[in-house]
Image (spheres, grey):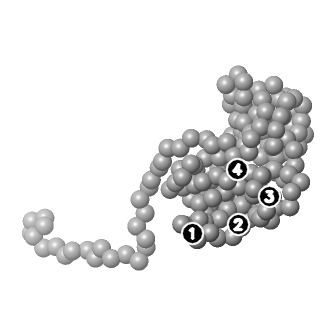
Amino acid sequence: MALGDNHEALPMNSVAPHVAPISMDCQWIEVIEAGKISTADASDVDGTGDFVDTRVVIKKDAIGGACTTLVACIKYDDGVSAISQAARIGCIGRCRRGSTVDNWVRLRAKSGNAYADITPDPTKDMGDGTFKRTTPNVANAAWDTLGCNEFVFFSELPLTGTGTFTTATLEVKGL
């Protein structure tokens, strides 16, 4: 019998979802400006009133609109030589669709905590001679967007150590 003379079609039905690998390009976006990551946020983190009004609300489209994860890194002065306290970063998010706006909710980091501790390593972090950036850590310093399209990041514990921290910023990229 020749190959192909007698064959049966294999069933192609599947209960598993079809998955296609995708990738996107997006820039690092500054979400906490210079001087604010080196001071703890004394405001009540409740997503209302002065808390949100005094911060930049980041739109998902600015970070890569199709993303489902936000990963953060700290950009800090190249002259920093030691870290005594990691920056503790929190994030809140909400969904805005036309005139429908959800309440702000606290987003948990991928680590399961209500925050992400980000510790620069001046001996290993890469830099350009002026600034260094922490190595992105999707297991710790990342948040699932939970369908939100607006985000506010804040510092719960200040980044401190030996060197200049007033120029440090928090940057986020969508994955």
Residue 156 position in % (x across, y down): 84, 53
Using the image as rendered, state which of residue 11 and residue 141 is in the foreground: 141
Q: CA distance from mark 1 to mark 2?
A: 15 Å
Q: Position of residue 75 (x, y in %)?
A: 72, 36
**In contact (CB < 8 Å): disc 4 and disc 2:** no
Quick one: label 1 or label 2, which is nearer the N terminus?
A: 1
Q: Residues within 10 Å of mark 2 (few under 14, many from 20)?
A: some
Q: Secondary structure at mark 4?
A: loop
- Which circle marks residue 104 in the picture? 2
Quarter assignment of residue 2: bottom left
Disc 1 marks a residue whose amino acid type is Ser
Disc number placed over residue 99 in the picture, else none: 1
Whether residue 87 can be seen here: yes
Vertical comparison of 104 with 40: above or below: below
Q: Residue beneath label 3, please?
A: 51
In the rendered image, the quadrant that contains the N terminus is bottom left
Q: Secondary structure at mark 1?
A: loop
The front one of 174 and 112 is 174
Q: Nearer the viewer, mark 4 or mark 1?
A: 1
Residue plotted at (64% across, 70% down): 102
Cβ–Cβ under 8 Å for marks 1 and 3: no
Which comes before the other along the chain, label 4 or label 3?
3
Residue linked to disc 4: 56
Type of the residue with mark 2: Trp
